[in-house]
Image (spheres, helix red, strand yellow):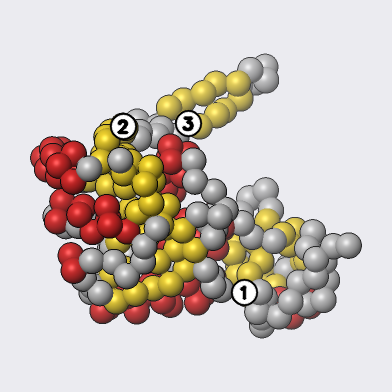
Amino acid sequence: MSEIIKKNSWVVLLSKEKSFVVRCKGKFNTQYGIINLDELIGKPYGSEVKTHLGKKFVVTKPYLCDVMRKLERGPQVILPKDAAVILAKTGIGKNAVAIDAGSGSGFLAIFLANYLKRVYTYEKNEKFHELVKRNLKILGIRNAVAKLGDVRKGFEEKNVDLVVLDLEEPEKVVKHAYNALKKGCWLVIYCPFAEEVGRVVNEMEKRGFVITEIVENLQRSWSISFDKKGFSHLRAEPYVTFTGFIVFGRKV
């Protein structure tokens, strides 16, 4: 049986030219005309809707990548391409518990919560902490807990499967990560600068971690066009953006 669209739920309005991510409530103005979203309530996902000018959209259920476009963004975030590498390289799954520090805008905590049992995300800046709580509420995420606190004083949680550090001077938190982790489990540190990699590796080895890998995750987008004969032509985007180094270690 098809899932029914409810009032105030997120939906994707999809067409060949454009897509929109909106709450199902009231009227929505587009360059193609006005859509009465209240008319969708009670209909199944996959239904069609027309603007008052006759433009058709298919109404689909959103994925995480859709609704994250609607989140409020403050500090720099760990991008999905790097968050995905963290999940892939550690191999942790739906029964795992993770700590994310610092929260920033909460993007990594939200990404991890979509795949793991529970995520505890720490932020010492009260303004950013409130931002994270708002973003979690917008998405209705219940298995991520936003905590206000300085992780240089330690973590409350023990026997977790993953600790991710994305903050200033992460080497000062390595000992606390060690105490929070199960044996054999993962510490991942995001380093925007090469100099920082050396500091965290030295501290991790001193504290009882084995370094498994240091990754620079580059991603390039491509566009496609077709000539008059129907042959396809691929063109790489001119820039490959560097985001940071990711250091992977396991507690021995």
Does label 2 or label 1 sit earlier along the sequence?
1
Q: Say whether residue 20 is visible.
A: yes
Q: Is residue 106 visible?
A: no
Q: Nearer the viewer, residue 150 or 70?
A: 150
Q: Residue at x 36, y 62 (%)?
A: 158
Measuring from the top left, give residue 112's x and y in whole percent. Answer: 47, 56
**239 in relation to 84, above or below:** above
Q: CA distance from mark 2 to mark 1?
A: 42 Å
Q: Disc 2 designates what residue?
A: 213
Q: Is residue 149 left or right of residue 39?
A: left
Q: Earlier in the sequence, mark 2 or mark 3?
A: 2
List the single residue furthest toward the right: 1
Question: How far across and down, in percent of the image, does residue 64 sit?
Answer: 56, 57
Residue sitting at x 46%, y 25%: 235
- In the depicted view, which residue is nearer to us: 68 or 193? 193
At label 1, counting other C-alpha atoms closer than 10 Å, the crowd grade (few under 14, some 14-19, many 20 or more) is some
Say which residue label 3 marks: 222
Residue 178 screen position, x and y as percent: 27, 52
Between marks 1 and 3, how big is the CA–CA gap? Answer: 31 Å
Per the image, label 3 sits on a secondary structure element best described as: strand
18 vs 77, left or right, is: right
In the rendered structure, which amino acid carries the disc numbered 3?
Answer: Trp
Is residue 235 shown left or right of residue 230? left
State yes or no: discs 1 and 3 in contact (Cβ < 8 Å).
no
Question: Which residue is rendered at x = 71% and y = 80% of the image?
Answer: 7
The numbered disc on residue 23 is 1
- The type of residue carrying mark 2 is Glu
| For residue 136, above or below residue 84 | below
